[in-house]
Image (cartoon, rainbow, N blue to C red):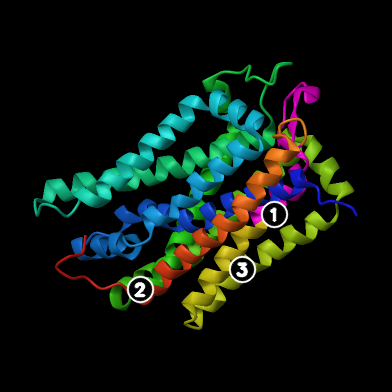
Amino acid sequence: MMLPDLNIIWYILVGVLFTGYAMLDGFDLGVGALQLFVRKDEHRRMFLNSIGPVWDGNEVWLVTGGGALFAAFPQAYATVFSGFYLPFMLLLCSLIFRAVAIEFRSKEDWTWWRQFWDVAFSAGSLVSSLLIGVAMGNIVRGIPLDADHEFAGTFLGLLNPYSLLMGITTVLLFAMHGAIYLTMKTEGELLEIVSGWVPRLIGFFLASYFLFNLYTLVEVPWVLETVRARPYVFLVVAANVLIVLNIPREIHKGREFHAFLSSCTAMVLMMATFGLTYFPNMVLSSPEIANSLTIYNAASTQKTLGIMLIIALIGVPLVLAYTASIYWVFRGKTTLTKSSY
């Protein structure tokens, strides 16, 4: 009897967990990025309360994904978290500062107080989105690793043009995703405002997305070689673009939930494109390809992977059930009450 390849299973599972994080925390990071584009205090409070019941639960997916990476691929976890130490500390500080802003913003009625925390909330969201994209850009491009699989680069080296463009693309993706989410949660004047943003944000995102892919062909030539060997990746990319272009149609027809599902599907397809292209690498070394970490030389023992898979089969459904129940309880349009943010 042929046993399943546990390394591949865990590669997929880690990808699923980080995709869940991108989908869920992506829209509330996008809401934060758009916070300063509305002027009325009531509208800004609506933005906060649209994500209020779910934003902290969304970040559970990041913790779970990081835990899965640590358990299944400890060498990759150690290399990435040590090499990206400063960017990840900045990301953590941004997420913390953003969380404080959500809780403190409406504690006082002073105009300067609310404006300060609005800026903090928006800045934390923008910096977090940018850093997530920069980290992903460096993973795709490859980072310098020595023979012991330790990071051999510098912090400034991580801020290269390719990765910064990926960061900008991620900011636009999350902003688009957040605006689409807001069309489900708002009504009246605010709904009209947000609905008007969606086509423009889609245009900005697609322009940045195409530019990033063109730059990838120049900056990361191994990607083109891999895609030629795996032509099904082209189909995934094409499906992704069609799904994104379907979003304005759904909003025009008043089907905001369908538009949000389309946006979520697009994010799944983007992560699938990355996973299918990058496999079997976990951390690509550049320029010394031989020093790369793969799903085999970065993995835990087969016994550990097997035990952790049993735990994951118990834990992941619980996370899914928790997430689904929260979204079900707080479904529908957002309203302001005395207990609102």
Range shown magenta: 270-295
Looking at the rendered structure, the kind of residue marked 3 is Leu
Q: Residues within 10 Å of mark 1 (few under 14, many from 20)?
A: many
**Residue visible at 9% across and 54% down?**
109
C-alpha distance separating marks 1 and 3:
18 Å
150 vs 224, left or right, is: left
Above or below, 83 relative to 308: above
Q: Position of residue 302 (x, y in %)?
A: 75, 39
| Residue beneath disc 3 | 245
Instruction: In this rendered view, identify the residue nearer to me: 301 or 336.
Output: 301
Is 7 placed above or below 317 here?
above
Crowding near pointer 3: few (<14 within 10 Å), some, many (20+)? some
Horizontal relation, residue 101 to residue 126: left or right:
left
Task: From this view, report whether residue 136 is shown above or below residue 201.
Answer: above
Q: Alpha-carbon distance for marks 3 and 2?
A: 20 Å
Tell me where residue 231 appears, x and y as whole percent.
86, 54
Whether 264 is among the magenta residues is no
In the image as oriented, which residue stretches furthest toward the bottom?
Answer: 253
Disc 2 marks which residue?
Answer: 191
Crowd tier of the residue under label 2, counting other residues whose Cα lies within 10 Å: few below 14, some 14–19, many 20 or above: some
252 in relation to 82, above or below: below
Q: Is residue 246 visible?
A: yes
Q: Residue at x 48, y 41 (%)?
A: 130
Q: Given the image, on which type of amino acid does mark 2 rest?
A: Leu
Q: Secondary structure at mark 2?
A: helix
Q: Quadrant of residue 300?
A: top right
Tell me, for residue 272, which label it has, or none: 1
